[in-house]
Image (cartoon, grey):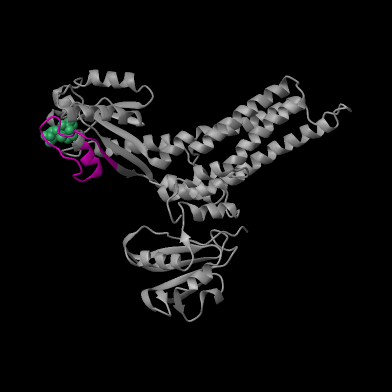
Amino acid sequence: MLVFDAICALATPPGVAGLAIVRLSGNGAFDIADKCFRGKHPLSEAKSHTILFGTFVYGDSHNGETPIDQVTAFIYKAPHSYTGEDTVEFGCHGGTIVYQEILEALIAAGARPAAPGEFTKRAFLNQKIDLTQAEAVGDLIHAVSQQGSHAAARQLMGGFTRRLAELREKLLELCGLLELELDFSQEDIELIDKGVLAERIEETRGFCLELAQSFKSAEIARTGYSVGIVGYPNAGKSSLLNALLDRKRAIVSATPGTTRDYIEEMLHLDGAAVRLIDTAGFRESDDTIEVEGIELAVELLRQCHLILVLNDISEGKNHSAPLLASLRAQFGDADVELVQTKIDTVSTVEASNDGLLQLSSQTGAGIRELKQFLATKAASASGAMQDTLINARQAALLTQAAESLAKAREAALAGESNEFTAIDLRTALKNIGEITGAVWNDDILNAVFGKFCIGK
Ligand SMILES: Nc1nc2c(ncn2[C@@H]2O[C@H](COP(=O)(O)OP(=O)(O)OP(=O)(O)O)[C@@H](O)[C@H]2O)c(=O)[nH]1
Ligand SMILES: [Mg+2]
């Protein structure tokens, strides 16, 4: 185990709460903690994985000690802790004062404030977890959907780690054979048939590409399936947002141009997270705030996976046809769906549906069907989540690995010297190594842990 200086941080969110946890980890953690802890026994004498009860104090016996709180101290002795180091986790009462005083006391006793993600970074450096697991910790904490959370949990258990390890082994085996052949190049021995070699490389390349392509669906599981609600002013956009959320979130009024900014809310449907975005109605306007709102809406639609174009059926079924056509032309990529609103204002015959989405936010007709529609869309877009949530960093490395493997395959098929194939295989191995952290440098670690929050 590597030994680093002692760091401390609040591991729970600050604010009024029943409990809070302050973490202390690193060299001399128990001695530092003992300067502030008054219990039956000093913490340094406690066994690992025990909990001690006592009083946390600030100050010293010379100038007097001030009790800060009654606390529990969880003891973890190296290497059996999250970081792999000696660790104490203090359970204290929540609020805004107690934890700050505890941190101040620990710092006065010799610890320093932890940097973002520093505990998890130490866990990585001490080989408790690999980089994909460290990233899973981040995904688990920030998960917005059950789906994403469960995939992150599986990744944290090491599912992805094992798959990448298998991949690395396969490539290492191929590299080993090629390099061995090189050693015997004078004797002209062929240890692996070039066709078989090319085939095996192609298999791993396919696997890398498939994983890299799951990035898009992983992003949806990670941040939610985004649905833009658009239409001409007064189409009933904000009313629909409220109806879907089942509460009055946005202002609704008969005045066109009511919504000028955009409103974003998360809706949870069958374990999927759907991010609803209500926008300013599309129209020519002299009002600069409204124009800005419309421009913002267009910008937001670029990030949406689905665009619902709301048409007020009382204005005619095809009233929004020009808007629909222009959005379909502009956002070919995303799904653009027409939704008829205010169907309570027309006769049932007029509203008779041709399999299209139609609803009334006022009576609630069609809302359940729209939710079902959104849930199905979100579920299919986020794909069958397995044991991993590919992120941008991993996807980029997998794509690079696939490119090197394509080159290696070409070299093998062209009957070039093994040297060339082996070099490309080694490059792919390095890329895959960077995913798990088998190969790392400070830039890689900063990219991963810089995004973490303090205390993690
Ligand atoms: N009858 C009926 N009226 C509705 C329905 N949905 C909305 N309205 C009315 O239509 C008007 C406009 O509704 P909003 O939800 O504010 O429409 P909007 O599209 O958000 O409008 P802007 O934000 O101004 O672009 C309000 O007077 C609503 O009460 C509906 O299903 N049936
Ligand atoms: Mg509105």
Most extreme residue toward the front is: 62
What range of the chain is rendered magenta? 240-265
Q: Is residue 257 above or below residue 135?
A: above
Q: Quadrant of residue 58?
A: bottom left
Q: Is residue 40 above or below residue 11?
A: below
The answer to whether residue 361 is left or right of residue 302 is: left
Report the label total: 0
Q: Main secondary structure of the magenta part?
A: loop
Residue found 17% across the figure and 26% down from its top: 313
User: 185 or 387: nearer the eye?
Assistant: 185
Residue 280 is a magenta residue: no
The answer to whether residue 213 is left or right of residue 94 is: right
Q: Is residue 268 above or below residue 8?
A: above
Residue found 53% across the figure and 59% down from its top: 82
Q: Quadrant of residue 304?
A: top left
Q: Position of residue 109 (x, y in %)?
A: 47, 69
User: 52 or 216: nearer the eye?
Assistant: 52
Residue found 20% across the figure and 20% down from its top: 318
Image-quarter location of ligand 1: top left
Most extreme residue toward the left is: 254
Residue 396 seen in this snapshot:
yes
Q: Position of residue 139 (x, y in %)?
A: 45, 47
Residue found 55% across the figure and 32% down from its top: 210
Q: Position of residue 453 (x, y in %)?
A: 42, 51
User: 234 or 262: nearer the eye?
Assistant: 262
Q: Is residue 350 above or below residue 277?
A: above
The quadrant of the image that shows the N terminus is bottom right
